[in-house]
Image (cartoon, rainbow, N blue to C red):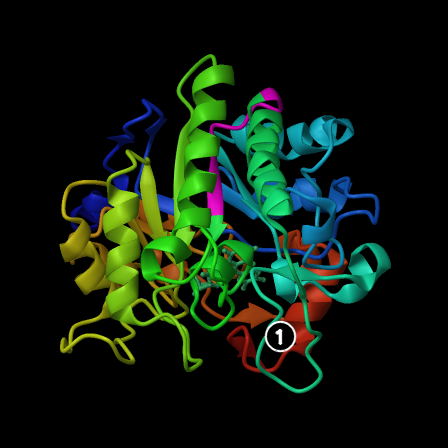
Amino acid sequence: MNSKYAPFFEPFTFSSGVEVKNRIVMAPMTNFSSNSDGTVTDAEVKYYARRSSGAGMVITACTYVTANGKGFHGEFGGDRDELIPSLKQVANAIKEQGAKAVLQIFHGGRQCPPELVKNGEIVSASAIPAEGDGKPVPRELTDQEIESIIHDFGETTRRAIEAGYDGVELHGANGYLIQQFFSPHSNIREDRWGGSIEKRLSFPLAVVDEVKKVAAEHARGPFMIGYRFSPEEPETPGITMAETLVLIDALADKNLDYLHVSLQEFWSKPRRGVEDSRARIEIIHERVGDKVPVIGVGSLYTADEALKAIQTGVPFIALGRELIIDPDWVQKVSEGREAEIVTKIDKNKQQELVVPDPLWQAIIHTPGWFPMNE
Ligand SMILES: Cc1cc2nc3c(=O)[nH]c(=O)nc-3n(C[C@H](O)[C@H](O)[C@H](O)COP(=O)(O)O)c2cc1C
């Protein structure tokens, strides 16, 4: 290995006691390939196995904690005990290849396709649709339903423990239910769950507390809890960088194992809310300091691009599309073969890359999503 890449390969022990062998994380990626009953398919299990011998930790696609939180066709479920064997198949596939397995847990809220939820009734913090033509108006959740969904996050955490995962990541990013409660766009409630920024924080923090409680009760060994958030929303009103700093101050006090910033572009800059021309990730990392490790992500295709990112001091780098395009990204760097890393998808290599059909079709038919060899 070229010694300049040594920072990628430093082991790390999280506050829960979970140890990882390196600083590369596989980013959570939905693959649309599970069965309609919420069980995983062999194709997706093989897809995870193929990508789990390099990164220190693999975060799965998001799984729904409540039936009316299913956000994607072909999403695997975590909302019922019958699904524990299915959850276990993915955990085993990841761990057998040497990575730690983290289950990303979520509720899609107003972003769920109505045909995936009972009676087509989608729910959210308030009855406000997402922006865009024809978006359905969600029904505002009752206080009791909110308590029930918080409980469901705990129940899915218990299932993750029973299925052998090393941790869970709370999906508080990308506009789904946890974020919908924090956002002034989707939350105009005037009860204990909304009104002031502190009250908009109540749901995300209650989910954190519930998941921590369940982990303390059920985990027999180290079990980590991470939280993923999106730093800003484009809508007005919407989450600003200034509000995100309030969120991360609150999260940093919760003794979590890590905070994961969801970005398409690692170096992207704030849209509004702060007078600071640095990248969002640098502002966030400075604010969090040493309180909790941060994972950065976004369009880091080559070894040198990822190196520049980790040289900011952010302790972990997540790779998403990069590991679909080249499952051997990490091994190539560790073997001094970084020049051989593939950075564009080759439309003829589905079998070799071990990518399930629904994900492959989405990739090759969505212009601009993945860099592609023409
Ligand atoms: C196919 C695909 C599915 C994704 N699904 C999820 C998901 O389930 N949960 C999530 O937090 N982010 C999801 N993302 C976002 C990625 O985790 C990541 O933030 C984004 O792709 C940018 O990183 P990259 O440039 O390394 O791919 C998805 C991205 C892709 C490409």
**Based on the displayed image, in which of its 4 quarters is residue 362 positioned?**
bottom right
Q: Is residue 54 visible?
A: no
Identify the residue at horizontal 65%, vertical 54% (top origin). Answer: 352
Q: Is residue 68 left or right of residue 104?
A: right
Label 1, on which residue?
129
Q: Position of residue 189 (x, y in %)?
A: 50, 63
Q: Indicate yes or no: mark 1 CB to ligand 1 under 8 Å.
A: no
Identify the residue at horizontal 62%, vertical 57% (top origin). Answer: 108
Q: Position of residue 210 (x, y in %)?
A: 47, 32
Q: Which residues are magenta?
A: 162-170
**Based on the displayed image, in which of its 4 quarters is residue 16 positioned?**
top left
Label 1 element class: loop
**Based on the displayed image, in which of its 4 quarters is residue 122 positioned?**
bottom right
Q: Is residue 303 left or right of residue 110?
A: left
Residue 165 belongs to magenta span? yes
Give neighbour class at mark 1: few <14, some 14-19, many 20+ (Cα, 10 Å).
many
Q: Position of residue 304 (x, y in %)?
A: 26, 62
Question: Furthest residue to the top?
Answer: 220
The quarter of the picture where the N terminus appears is top left
Comparing 308 with 199, the one in front is 199
Query: Which amino acid is tagged 1?
Result: Pro
